[in-house]
DNA sequence: GTGCACATGTAATGTGTTACATGATTAT
DNA sequence: ATAATCATGTAACACATTACATGTGCAC
């Protein structure tokens, strides 16, 4: 079975909190400055329909009175699929190209126990360090000959990767500290 | 006239260096660790066809002997369109959602005079500072109540933005220094 | 002369974007 | 009553991904 889109997983994850309508979900995307998704109804409603077809979500009881609203809630199969999505070990590609998707997954992990979060962070750390090494090697070998703009642009990538490494180290340190004081 | 895709502009920019074939361009994407684009022929060849249809590129003289290769070079209209693409002031959206596209533009700017680069960096700096303020405000207001994973994920965004601010400050400082010593 | 890398393409598919359409409910 | 907002949806379109198809030149 083919994979669902990131948007669909994001919707599925948001529905874990409380039954919501497509309009509610759109508002969430607007209000959140993560800005990973747009609030286009032409994306959200079809994605909800796909989730319905897979039986990962189901219509919840519509509220009496007020406007017509279609509320959705995840099914058991939906909860399972979402948990499996969260549980996937982050690949090199995930960390390199889809950083914000990984951060989305991390954000959804918070509710449960801290162990999966720690494992996820450690896996990310491994990939980040490999990536940083490669970037630095490429930078040393090739950028000196490049024009200024290209040098700066590449440096931005390297600095970004370094910031991610620092962040993950801080995150892991914070988890260790929390564990000790608990 | 609708905008071309980022991939098409990237191809157009690469062709400014030397006439190349679709295969050459693909190889460039594989070799470069910027990894913004994939090397799928199903993306590159159609993009080249679109550029041809717009007369932004034209077939260059094929090399005598050897394999069949279709070389392309930018036309005058293509060079103009590319220069205009580079010249667009980076919007808030560009900086927030399409950082790597902005870095791609910056990389292509290197060849000319340093003035456009400086203007570009200063515009980015403005947007980044606004963005960082908003992120920090949101973080202070909303993250304390969030679960651990979400806190960490949001912190990653904030740290990333801070790293970009530091990078742009460093880049501008470097340009000022270069100007003084010149 | 057979296999392999080179080089160009096409087709099916899925998805997001933009823009438009349609009704219901609340506010004035 | 009328306008504005809420809420859901659809249609056209462009683009990327994946997989497949095709032929050429070179190496052995």
Image (spheres, coloured by chain):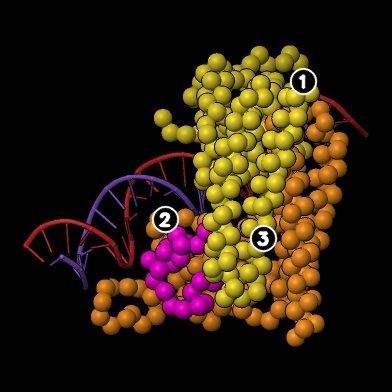
Chain colours: A yellow, B orange, C red, D purple
Q: CA distance from mark 2 to mark 1?
A: 50 Å
Residue beneath label 2, please? B40
Chain letter of mark 1 equals A
Q: CA distance from mark 1 to mark 3?
A: 39 Å
The residue drawn where x is 80% and y is 33% is B143
Residue B53 belongs to magenta span: no
Between A64 and B109, the one lying in front of the other is B109
Query: As rendered, which of A169 and B91 lies closer to the eye?
Result: A169
Highlighted magenta segment, given as a residue range: B13-34
Give x and y (percent) for residue C1.
6, 62
Q: Residues within 10 Å of mark 3 (few under 14, many from 20)?
A: many
Q: Is residue A147 above or below residue A85?
A: below
Marked residue nearer the N-terminal end (1 or 3): 3
State the image coordinates of residue B174 (x, y, percent, origin top left).
Answer: 75, 72
Decide if residue C28 is on the left or right side of residue B153: right
Spatial CA distance of label 3 from label 2 is 26 Å
Residue behind mark 3: A156
Label 2: which secondary element: loop
- The residue depicted at 28 percent of the width and 73 percent of the height is B68
- Image position, residue A167 (x, y; %): 70, 44
Label 1's element? loop
Viewport quadrant of the C terminus of chain A: top right
Label 3 element class: helix
Disc 1: which residue: A182
Q: Could you tell me what secondary structure mostly forms the magenta stretch?
A: helix
């Amino acid at each position: 079975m083919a994979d669902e889109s990131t948007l669909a997983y994001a919707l599925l994850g948001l529905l874990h909190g409380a039954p919501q309508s497509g309009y509610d979900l759109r508002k969430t995307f607007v209000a959140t400055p993560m800005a990973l998704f747009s609030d286009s109804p032409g994306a959200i409603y079809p994605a909800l329909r796909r989730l319905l077809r897979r039986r990962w979500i189901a219509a919840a009881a519509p509220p009496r009175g007020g406007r017509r609203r279609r509320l959705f809630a995840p099914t058991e199969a939906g909860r399972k699929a979402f948990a499996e999505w969260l549980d996937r070990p982050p690949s090199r590609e995930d960390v390199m190209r889809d950083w914000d998707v990984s951060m989305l997954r991390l954000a959804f992990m918070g509710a449960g126990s801290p162990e999966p979060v720690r494992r996820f962070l450690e896996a990310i750390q491994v990939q980040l360090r490999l990536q940083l090494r490669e970037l630095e090697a490429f930078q040393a070998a090739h950028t000196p000959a490049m024009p200024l703009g290209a040098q700066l642009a590449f440096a931005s990538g390297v600095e970004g990767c370094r910031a991610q490494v620092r962040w993950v180290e801080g995150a892991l340190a914070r988890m260790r500290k929390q564990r000790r004081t608990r």
